[in-house]
Amino acid sequence: MKAIRWYAPRDMRVVEIEKPTPKPHEALIRIESTGVCGSDMHYFAEGRIGKTVITTPIILGHEYAGIVEDVGSEADRSLLGKRVAVEPGIPCMRCEYCLKGHYNVCTKLQFPGGPPNDGALCEYICVHAAFCFPVPEGMTSAEAAMIEPLAVALHAIELANLKAGETVAILGLGPIGLLTAQAARVAGAGKIYGCDLHDYRVAASAAHGVDIAFNAAHENTLDVILRETNGRGVDIAIDCARSTETPAMCCRVARPAGRCVLVGISGEENGLFPVDIARRKELTITWCRRFLFNFPTAIDLVASGRIDVKSMITHSYPLERSLDAFSLVEQASDGVLKASIDQ
Ligand SMILES: [Zn+2]
Ligand SMILES: [Zn+2]
């Protein structure tokens, strides 16, 4: 089968590899769609996220969906023929964190498209059947692949402990930021503020629930938020950017005793943090690590039309042109929000 393998920064090639066969508990999925994620950009361009380094060539891609074509002897046969959104990252289910239900921080978690595990830029993949979530009729695989980033957004809002009417600032209006805005809206947020460094994303954000959006390259984020909130700051500040500076900005724009949720991946091992501000304000700061039991809710919210993922899929490429899709996202060109690789 065909696959796209990453060899070096910005060097991805079409290769021929063996089609996998499912182990007893696995499902074989014919992949129909894989989304390009902001986190993929670190591996694509730098070959690493902090200390996690690609040492041997791998297949990237972790936001994917497709059709279950076969299942192993111990897997749920009712999955056969179904279109599924796949939760990436298979935890060990034996360690302390897994047993306590915190499987997203399992230290033995195998994440596809993160070294050393191959991901979904290929024709077929085998995955633990328990992590395959059938989607309703009418949901395309490109939309089903968006369930993964939506699950991240839902987890972020869960961690934010958002209450009806609370104000939210979202720093970074890429797909995760826009989905987080929608999730905040559905959860009952009051005014939502958002900023990004690209005008087209600022413009797109109104359709995703952001009330007041601005370009942080042209306006000072702290000034805008303080001006708009009469000097108070927001109840909840959420970092959805790929920046070393935005976690600190969250602390600045949050009100005293407010909450910060940090979702963005700067790619650096260390970051700058305004400990004095965070202490004086007695902020609650939470990092968000992917998702935790959020797939079923994400599917329901999309199926019921309460969250829109379709309009975020701005570009579609065939598998062979994965490199073009990655370059497009890296350069944030042509108004790209989510680039989808479809087959
Ligand atoms: Zn992702
Ligand atoms: Zn575990």
Image (cartoon, rainbow, N blue to C red):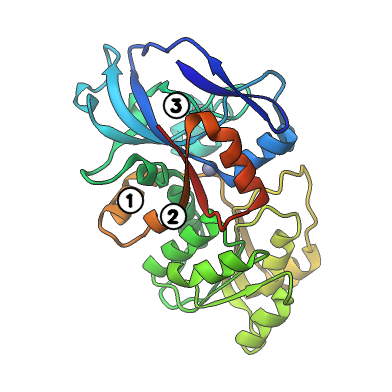
Q: Which residue bears the numbered disc 3?
A: 93
Please indicate whether residue 262 sits to the left or right of residue 95 in the image. Answer: right
163 or 244: nearer the viewer: 244
Q: Is the N terminus in the top left, top right, bottom left or bottom right quadrant?
A: top left
Q: Position of residue 99 (x, y in %)?
A: 45, 32
- Mark 3–mark 1 Cα distance, whole angstroms, equals 22 Å
Q: Position of residue 48 (x, y in %)?
A: 72, 33
Question: Which amino acid type corresponds to the residue marked 2 in the rendered image?
Answer: Leu
Picture quadrant of residue 260: bottom right
Q: Residue at x 39, y 47 (%)?
A: 294
Q: Is residue 100 above or below residue 164?
A: above
Marker disc for residue 154: 2
Q: Residue at x 57, y 62 (%)?
A: 173
> In the displayed image of the protein, which residue is found farthest to the bottom?
230
Please indicate whether residue 65 sits to the left or right of residue 177 in the image. Answer: left
Sequence order check, earlier mark of 3 and 1: 3
Q: Nearer the viewer, mark 3 or mark 1?
A: 1
Q: Is mark 3 within 8 Å of ligand 2?
A: yes
- Mark 2–mark 3 Cα distance, whole angstroms, equals 23 Å
333 or 235: nearer the viewer: 333
Q: Which residue bears the numbered disc 1?
A: 297
Are discs 2 and 1 less than 8 Å apart at CB?
Answer: yes
Q: Secondary structure at mark 2?
A: helix
Picture quadrant of residue 84: top left
